[in-house]
Image: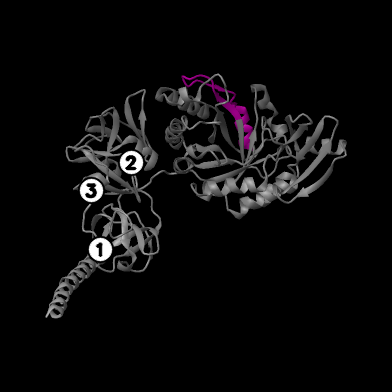
Amino acid sequence: MAKKRKKKRGHSKAVPVLAALLLILIIGAVGIITSYIKKYTPSDARMNLDEYYAQTKEDDVALILQDTVSETKGKLVDGEVYLPYSVAVQQLGSRFYWDEETQAMLYTTAEEVVSIQPESTSYTIGGQTVTEEVPPVRKLEDTYYLALHFLQEHMQMTAEVYENPNRAVIRYQWETVQTVPAAEDTVIRYQGGIKSPILGDVKQGDSLLLLEEMEDWSRVMTQDGLDGYVEKKALGSIQETELAYTGSYEEKFPNQVRDHKINLAWHQVTSEAANSAMESDIKDMTGVNVISPTWFSVVSTEGNISSLASKEYVDKAHAKNLEVWGLIDNFNESVSTYDTLVQKSSRSHIIEMLISEAKRVGLDGINVDFETLTEEEAPHFIQFIRELSVACRKEQLVLSIDNPVPSYTYFYNRKEQGIVADYVIIMGYDEHTAGFQEAGSVASLPFVEEGITETLKEVPAQKVINGVPFYTRLWTVGNDGSVASEVCSMDQADQYVKEKGMEVYWNTEVSQNYAEAETESGTQQIWLEDEESLEAKMKLIKEYDLAGCAAWKLGFERADVWDIISSYLQ
């Protein structure tokens, strides 16, 4: 009996142990299943869009520019969206300009400069008073703002405004982009992952702008300005979509582009007496149809200019079928270009004096040669060009602008120059110039070609003239590491090479003849500008179908160069 009782007690103990083990297994399985479900079930949490767009004020308006959410905010005032002036100009590229001197917003058309006072609903354009429902310009918290609808009326841009939160989706560049359709109803998330919070819903058929493609997710932007991630399995095939402007604004800047190629020679004139040398200076010149004498210079921040202009010079040039484009420069080191151009009164005075002189002597055009501009000066320079273009258009004067090669001078705003001016001239030289601590070519072919291709990204070929040098530099690299150079004309360079018995060979990398010689004090080097190097540059002008050629400077050339230039400008 005792044994039976012991056996019975052992059996009764096993039951709860098995039950406990079973319970543990069930709990573990539930935990695993729960963990699995939790891991692979998409989150349905939604992100606060005010936080997403960093909206901190009730009147803030998020700005989505092309495919980028701007850090700068617009403002909502009396139901109208306003954009900061800095965004309108620096990012959208609008033609508005805040003039500190007159405390007005200026807008330049082909015919006039319109002045708009902040907080005013009225302004005059084309002799007519226009009254808006809301002020086109406001000053809010020490910042100037432009009404969105007003911007749309004066530039090629489109905008869609959305609420909850307030945001404006703005497009101002028209190009081919990649889009992808939603193949099914889905959501767009803040980051790539099913646990990332949801930004919004995407409906089947919605067209999404493709920003980045990854393995399982794609970064896209919705039409209402949400930049986030959608699972690739919910998307269709990538498409190339051409964005086209469908608004009503048209660029209307009539230009005076000639129906023939421009063959221009700059004529350096340093005194009134030097004008009389023009006929002898051009006696061997052939094929040239424009001569540009260096006649004008800004001499004060009030906008006064010096003038060497001569009617007799112009008459003689016209008799030889030459147009005359008078050149104005900013080379007076005692005159601040910034202090001059920042003042509307000074800009206007320069223009008035230029036009007066042009009419007095019978000029055909104005050539602007403002060099070494800084980024700070650039906005005021381009406004000066706009205002000058209005005056030149009225007087039927050709307006051309000299520019260094684009490297490091993006702020010159060549795109705007190409719209308002007749010609943009590339100064395709000074690759290595006085003061450089490295000897080198004045205009190697790769340097010249880069200047052309970069300019053509912003200016149409029929308005681009490439400048070529008739000079070179003789470099002396001292044994002590010093570097010095002197300018030589074509003949002077050849004569020096011959006198020193320097061996000349063709350098294929720069497409120039090169020579060097060792002296007691160091090494002399010269990259020759001659008929061969000039022809290589002219081939580029023809290859890219540019508007013409400009040469610096008359008197430094050999007679043979004129036939070479003309042969490539037919």
Q: Give the residue pinned by disc 3.
A: 49
User: For the residues carrying marks 3 and 1, which lies nearer the camera in this image?
Assistant: 1
- Residue 28 on image: x %, y %: 23, 67
- Relative side of 106 to 407, left or right: left
Q: Is residue 258 visible?
A: no
- 3D distance between C-alphas at marks 2 and 1: 39 Å
Residue plotted at (71% across, 49% down): 511
Nearer the N terminus, badge 3 or badge 1? 1
- 3D distance between C-alphas at marks 3 and 1: 30 Å
Residue plotted at (47% across, 22% down): 303
- Residue 445 on image: x %, y %: 66, 48
Residue plotted at (75% across, 44% down): 530
Q: Do the residues labelled 2 and 1 touch (CB within 8 Å)?
A: no
User: For the residues carrying marks 2 and 3, which lies nearer the camera in this image?
Assistant: 3
The answer to which quarter of the image holds residue 240 is: bottom left
Q: Does the magenta stretch include residue 304?
A: yes
Q: Closer to the camera, 74 or 357?
A: 74
Q: Give the residue pinned by disc 1.
A: 35
Task: Classify mark 1: helix, strand or loop.
Answer: helix
Q: State the mark number for residue 316.
A: none
Label 3 environment density (alpha carbons within 10 Å; few <14, some 14–19, many ≥20): some
Task: Classify mark 2: helix, strand or loop.
Answer: loop
- Residue 229 on image: x %, y %: 32, 58
Residue bounds of the magenta highlight: 294-319
Name the kind of residue labelled 3 in the image: Leu
Q: Give the residue pinned by disc 2.
A: 71
Q: Can residue 91 be seen in this view?
A: yes
